[in-house]
Image (tube, grey):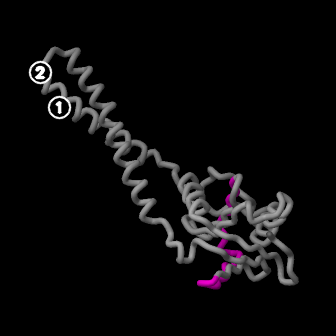
Amino acid sequence: MAWRTLRGMSIKTHITQEDYTAFLRFVSRSTSTLSDGEKFVRILIFCTVGVGIGIVLSLMSLSSHPTILLAMLSGAFVGAFLVQASMSHIIRRQVRRMRPAEDGSILGTRETFLSDDGIQVKSERYHTVFQWSLVRTIGITEQHIFVMIDRAMGIIYPKRAFSSEAEWEQFVAEIERQTGKVRTPPNTALEPTPTAP
């Protein structure tokens, strides 16, 4: 629940593994735009693997030309599927390894104070202040506020920490006021947001 103090605004939150997973999804979606060169390389890899498998399949059958074309097309689909499946497996394994420790600095209970000095975050394990000038974007999803300090670093505020929609809005408005930034939708790249007029 957020409340006003003489110094500013304050909120107490409890960050769970699910909140952190939502944060990772937000960062992933916000930064997953591929350049034309990256798209070309990805397509080239899929085609090369697929054609290679197709050639192997066609050499194994040593049949007529229509069969070779079918084998190459089948190989292309199988190759693309295998490359995509292996990449997905590697990414999921890396994400599991990157999960924060239950007794670390990301998960658990913390209190945040919004003041003219910045965003002050305090828990049993640390106490830090992020100056307002560090805020790059204010990401909003249906269940979270992500105040991004860098491309892959942010402060997580679950919606359940607020007693009402009005309190949620007041909290976001205070961050916008202090930073001069405006909230961004979930699929916006994590580049600094423009200053509010």
**x and y percent of residue 183 in the render?**
73, 59
Q: Nearer the viewer, residue 5 or 182?
A: 5
Quadrant location, the N terminus = bottom right
Q: Which structural element holds mark 1?
A: helix
Q: Is residue 126 left or right of residue 70?
A: right
Q: Amino acid at mark 1?
A: Val
Q: Percent from the top left, x then y, of residue 96?
A: 44, 60
Tell me: residue 25, above or below residue 115.
above
Q: Quadrant of the C terminus?
A: bottom right
Q: Magenta stretch: residue 168 in it?
A: no
The type of residue carrying mark 2 is Leu
Judge whether 190 appears above or below 56 on screen: below
Q: Is residue 54 above or below residue 159?
A: above
Give the quarter of the image for residue 163.
bottom right
Which residue is label 1 attached to? 56
Which residue is identified by label 2? 62
The residue furthest front is 102
Label 2 neighbour load within 10 Å: few <14, some 14-19, many 20+: few
Q: Which stretch did the figure color magenta?
A: 124-141
Residue 127 image offset from top left, x and y in percent = 64, 85
**Mark 2: secondary structure:** loop
In the depicted view, which residue is nearer to us: 136 or 81?
Answer: 81
User: Looking at the image, which residue is at 27% across and 30% down?
Assistant: 75
Q: Residue at 75% across / 82% down in the picture?
A: 117
Q: Is residue 88 left or right of residue 20?
A: left
- Inter-mark Cα distance, 1 to 2: 10 Å
Q: Residues within 10 Å of mark 1 (few under 14, many from 20)?
A: some
